[in-house]
Amino acid sequence: MTPMIALASTAVDRGQILIAGIAAMLITIFLGPKFIEFLREREFGQHIREEGPEEHQVKAGTPTMGGLIIFIAIAVPYLVLGPRDTQSLAVFGVAIGAAVLGFADDFIKVTKRRSLGLPARVKILVQIGLAVALWWVATDQVGLDPRLQVRIYDAQVYIGPVLYVILVFLVIAGASNAVNLTDGLDGLAAGACAIVLLAYTAITIISGQKGLALLSACLVGASVGFLWFNSFPASIFMGDTGSLGMGAAIGALAVMTQTELLLIILGGIFVIEALSVAVQVLSFKMFRRRVLLMAPVHHHFEMLAWSETKIMLRFWIIAAVCAGIGFTLYQHSIG
């Protein structure tokens, strides 16, 4: 292939990626108003925990399960324009599986009118199943070696199949639950997901993983489109349908691009949110003292009288800095 033909081919591929992302965004914006009206008519509203910030009580009844339109918007351009290769189908399948789990959790909450949905053990079992399926595809079908890529020093550490499947579970479950914990303020989780997924779009384009690049672009577009309705004051929440699904998509992308360790930096904002909960729980159990006024950490700043918009924007800045550092480390490792 001559250089000019290769360049044209690359331009076409990137054009498809851009079109897919824009299509996902427009589908979300187009479906949003009708879907919100549909949920309001059926009183599928968010139940607010009594122990949460008092200011959140006014949000009770806001339509939830917005993750449904997010994944419809992702599925259409991906299935129409995507190459549907094994890697991207595996990531898409894991994301849909986690979204279905979240939908079941949301449905129980709205129909039973309570803040608790599925038991924790059910969620863990489903996440184990999704992780094992992704591990099998990654190792048996795609042929990935069970190695940890240490991007800072450009090193590889062989961990073996047993530890690798455990690692895949920790990445999928950790990413899903971390995004779920972050989804506590209007627009916070959707915006942070868009930032991290934009970094993964760039990573997959650089690595030549076209299917994953197009899927990542769809995930970014749907997240941005959802922000049209989810930004403060939110007209709809993504619910566990969206947060568990988007988190699983990020985790699965990390596995398929072998950036499991780098995800700690790329998704630094989610790590901070999850760690804040872990530190709060451990501190209270061991010393009967709370480190934060309320966990996750975004609620701590709410208790300090920061506005939701101020917290959201500053956390987006942190997310962008973390994603930028992670992407730079990735570029350095392949340079």
Image (cartoon, grey):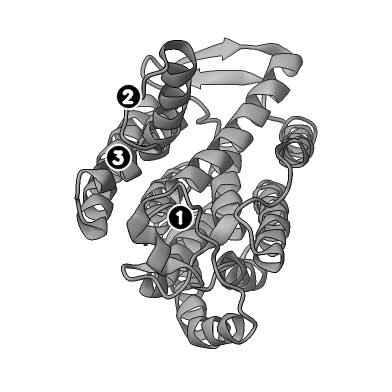
Q: Which mark, residue 155?
A: none
How far from the left and from the top, in percent, is residue 37? 54, 87
How far from the left and from the top, in percent, is residue 196? 40, 47
Occupied quadrant, residue 310:
bottom left
Q: Quadrant of the C terminus?
A: top left
**Helix, strand or loop at disc 1?**
loop
Occupied quadrant, residue 322:
top left
Q: Nearer the viewer, residue 272 or 259?
A: 272
Q: Nearer the viewer, residue 128 or 74?
A: 128
Give the amino acid at mark 2.
Answer: Val
Q: Which residue is mark 2?
A: 291
Measured in 3D between alpha carbons, the distance from the residue under mark 1 to the one under mark 2, in whole angstroms, is: 61 Å
How far from the left and from the top, in percent, is residue 144? 67, 29
**Helix, strand or loop at disc 2?**
loop
Give the amino acid at mark 1.
Answer: Thr
Q: Earlier in the sequence, mark 3 or mark 1?
A: 1
Q: Are marks 3 and 1 in contact (CB under 8 Å)?
A: no
Tell me, yes or no, if residue 277 can be seen here: yes
Give the amino acid at mark 3.
Answer: His
Q: Which mark, residue 300?
A: 3
Q: Which residue is mark 1?
A: 2
Q: Is residue 136 left or right of residue 167?
A: right
